[in-house]
Image: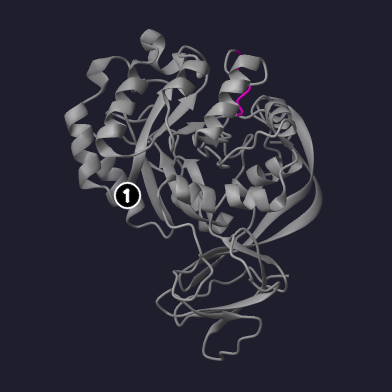
C-alpha cells in the first residue's frame, strides 16, 4: 500500500513497480519503473531501474495510466455560483488535467485565466461559453436569453487571444436555458466553430431543442455531454430513432461524453446502451458544488460506475485519460516513452461494497472501485484519494447516503 502522508517533488522521481494500462503502446513490460527528471521529463523506463538521487514512489504493483483527464467540470471558483476550486477536482483526486466546461464567457474569461487556470497545479483548459456572461448565476440568470446575450466579435477575439487554453465552445441546448430559442444558439456556435476550427461541446437535456436535432447539426470532433441522461424527451433508450441517431453519431466521430452531473446520468440508460454496444467516448464528472457531495463525488467514483455497468477496466481508463485528451487536441500517443512529459495517475482497483446513486436517485452497489494513490505532474507526486462526502450527508434525490 501507499503512504499518502507526503508529497514528492524537487529532484525528480523514480516510480517503482507499476503496471501500465491505457497507454495503447505495444511491448510495455508488465511491471515498469519510470525515472522522471527534475524538469518533469521521462528520462528512463524499464523493468528495474536504480537511481539513488531520485525520490522513490513505490507502486507495489499498482496501475499506472495516462493522467486522468476530466473533460467536463466547473472550476471558476468565485466567478460562478456553482464552481469549485481546481484542487477539489484535481490532483488530490487523481486528476491531472481538468477542462472547465463553459463556466466563463467572453466577458469574464480573463478572470478564469488569471485567477484559476494560471495558478493551478493541474493542467486546466476551458470551453468558452457562447453566452457572454457564462454561468455567473447558473440556472437563475440564463446566459442565452436572446441575441443580446451573445457578442460574436468579442467571442472570436477572446478565443484568438487564448488559443493556448481555450479548446472549444460550450452551448447549453436545453429549454430551461434558452426557452423557445431552440437550435439558434447551437447553429451560431457551429458557425463560430468552423471559423475558428474548434469543436463544440453541447449540453443536451430538456427539449427543445430535440436531442435528435442536435445530433444532426454536429460534425466529427464535436462533443455531446450528458449523453446518458435520463430526462424525459432526452433519453436515448426511450426512443429507438434517437438511439439509432446516437449510434450513427458515434460512427461519425462525434464524442459521446458522460458528463454525470447532478441531473444528467442514468444507470438505466448507461446499462442499456452498453448492453447494445454503445460505449461513451469519454467519461467526465460535471463536477460542481451541487453535484460533488450528492450524486457525483469525483472522477474515480464516476469511473467506477461505468465499470459496474459493464465497461472493461482498460476501456474506462482510456475514456478517462487519452480519449478526452484527443477530444481537446492534446497529445495522447506514446505517453509512456523517454523524452515525454510525465503526467500519470497511479491507482488501485479495490473490491468493495459501496452504495452510490445516479442523478435520478437510483441506487446501486459498486463491487469494485478505482482508488487513486498519486497524481504525477512532472517531477511532483501528489498523494491522492477518492472523495467521500461527510458522514451524515444525504442525497436529496433518494434520501439515502450521497
Q: Is residue 172 above or below residue 45?
A: above
Q: Is residue 136 visible to the viewer in this orientation of the structure?
A: yes
Q: Secondary structure at mark 1?
A: loop
Circle 1 residue: 165
Q: Which residue is located at x 70 percent, y 41 percent? A: 305
Q: Quadrant of residue 308?
A: top right
Q: Quadrant of the C terminus?
A: top right
Span of residues in magenta: 228-232
Which residue is rendered at x = 42% and y = 80% of the image?
Answer: 38
Q: Is residue 46 above or below residue 79?
A: below
Colouring rule applied to residues: one colour
| Badge 1 density bin: few <14, some 14–19, many ≥20, Cα 10 Å | some
Residue 262, given in percent of the width and then of the height, sits at 58, 30
User: Which residue shows up at 72% across the image and 30% down it?
Assistant: 276
Instruction: Identify the residue at horizontal 23%, vertical 33% (top origin).
Output: 155
Q: 129 left or right of 361?
A: left
Residue toward you, 393 or 21: 21
Where is the N terminus found, in terms of image quarters? bottom right
Amino acid at each position: 500500500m501507499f503512504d499518502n502522508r507526503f508529497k514528492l517533488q524537487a529532484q525528480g522521481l523514480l516510480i517503482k513497480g507499476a503496471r501500465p494500462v491505457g497507454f495503447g503502446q505495444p511491448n510495455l513490460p508488465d511491471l515498469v519503473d519510470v525515472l522522471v527528471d527534475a524538469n518533469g521529463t521521462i528520462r528512463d523506463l524499464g523493468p528495474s531501474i536504480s537511481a539513488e538521487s531520485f525520490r522513490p514512489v513505490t507502486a507495489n504493483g499498482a496501475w499506472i495510466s495516462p493522467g486522468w483527464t476530466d473533460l467536463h467540470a466547473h472550476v471558476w471558483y468565485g466567478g460562478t455560483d456553482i464552481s469549485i476550486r481546481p484542487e477539489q477536482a484535481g490532483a488530490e483526486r487523481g486528476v491531472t488535467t481538468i477542462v472547465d466546461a463553459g463556466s466563463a464567457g467572453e466577458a469574464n474569461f480573463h478572470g478564469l485565466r488569471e485567477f484559476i487556470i494560471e495558478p493551478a497545479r493541474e493542467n486546466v483548459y476551458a470551453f468558452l461559453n457562447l453566452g457572454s456572461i457564462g454561468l455567473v448565476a447558473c440556472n437563475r440568470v440564463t446566459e442565452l436569453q436572446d441575441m443580446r446575450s451573445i457578442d460574436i466579435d468579442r467571442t472570436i477575439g477572446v478565443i484568438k487571444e487564448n488559443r493556448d487554453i481555450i479548446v472549444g465552445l460550450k452551448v447549453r441546448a436545453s429549454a430551461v436555458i434558452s426557452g423557445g430559442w431552440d437550435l439558434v444558439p447551437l447553429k451560431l456556435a457551429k458557425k463560430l466553430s468552423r471559423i475558428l476550427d474548434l469543436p463544440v461541446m453541447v449540453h443536451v437535456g430538456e427539449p427543445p431543442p430535440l436531442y435528435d436535432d442536435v445530433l444532426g447539426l454536429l460534425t466529427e470532433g464535436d462533443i455531446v455531454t450528458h449523453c446518458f441522461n435520463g430526462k424525459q424527451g432526452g433519453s436515448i433508450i426511450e426512443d429507438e430513432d434517437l438511439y439509432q441517431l446516437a449510434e450513427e453519431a458515434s460512427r461519425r466521430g462525434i464524442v459521446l461524453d458522460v458528463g454525470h452531473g447532478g441531473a444528467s446520468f442514468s444507470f438505466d440508460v448507461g446499462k442499456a446502451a452498453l448492453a447494445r454496444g454503445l460505449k461513451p467516448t469519454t467519461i467526465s464528472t460535471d463536477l460542481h458544488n451541487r453535484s460533488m457531495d450528492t450524486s457525483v463525488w469525483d472522477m474515480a467514483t464516476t469511473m467506477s460506475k461505468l465499470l459496474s455497468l459493464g465497461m472493461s477496466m482498460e476501456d474506462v481508463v482510456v475514456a478517462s485519460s487519452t480519449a478526452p485528451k484527443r477530444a481537446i487536441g492534446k497529445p495522447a500517443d506514446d505517453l509512456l516513452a523517454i523524452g515525454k512529459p510525465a503526467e500519470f495517475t497511479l491507482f488501485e482497483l479495490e473490491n468493495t461494497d459501496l452504495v452510490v446513486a445516479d442523478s435520478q436517485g437510483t441506487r446501486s452497489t459498486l463491487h469494485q472501485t478505482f482508488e487513486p494513490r498519486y497524481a504525477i505532474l512532472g517531477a511532483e507526486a501528489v498523494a491522492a484519494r477518492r472523495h467521500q462526502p461527510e458522514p451524515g450527508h444525504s442525497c436529496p434525490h433518494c434520501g439515502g447516503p450521497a
